Image (spheres, rainbow, N blue to C red):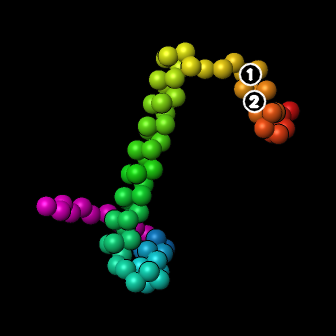
Amino acid sequence: MPHSTSIRFDKATVDRLDEIAATTGSTRAAVIKDAVAQFLDRDARFCRTVQQGLDAVREGRVVSHEDAKARMCALGITLE
């Protein structure tokens, strides 16, 4: 069952939401729902990636600073 919430936006934000809704043939509510869903997905991916990094450190799967620099140089990345 859907739950409702209330949020206040300034006029410029509402205007932008309405412009996107009109361009996509959608509604303001649908644009907001999509934006929130995309944010939550991106945040979940970020948290998983951070956890993978923390797990790697805890398990000792790390490289030294010098090794990291060498790997980047091997990829053609110029470092100072």
Seen at 46% across and 71% down, the residue is 13
Q: Identity of the amino acid at label 2?
A: Arg
55 versus 3 height, above or below: above
Outermost front residue: 74
Locate residue 30: give its quadrant.
Answer: bottom left
65 versus 46 height, above or below: above
Which quarter of the rendered picture does the N terminus lie within? Answer: bottom left
Seen at 38% across and 71% down, the residue is 31
Which quarter of the rendered picture does the C terminus lie within? Answer: top right
Viewer-side residue, 17 vs 13: 17
Viewer-side residue, 25 vs 13: 25
Which label was assigned to residue 71?
2
25 versus 49 height, above or below: below
Identify the secondary structure beneath mark 2: helix
The region drawn magenta spans 1-10
Whether the residues at callouts 2 and 1 have beta carbons within 8 Å, the answer is yes
**Left or right: 29 in relation to 10:** left
Seen at 49% across and 33% down, the residue is 50
Which label was assigned to residue 59?
none
Q: Identity of the amino acid at label 1?
A: Asp
Identify the secondary structure beneath mark 1: helix
Viewer-side residue, 61 vs 33: 61
Label 1 sits on residue: 67
**Left or right: 56 in relation to 41:** right
Q: Residues within 10 Å of mark 1 (few under 14, many from 20)?
A: few
Secondary structure, magenta segment, majority class: loop
Magenta stretch encompasses residue 50: no
The answer to whether residue 18 of the structure is visible from this angle is: no
Give the image location of residue 7, x and y in percent. 32, 63
**Left or right: 7 in relation to 38:** left
42 versus 13 height, above or below: above
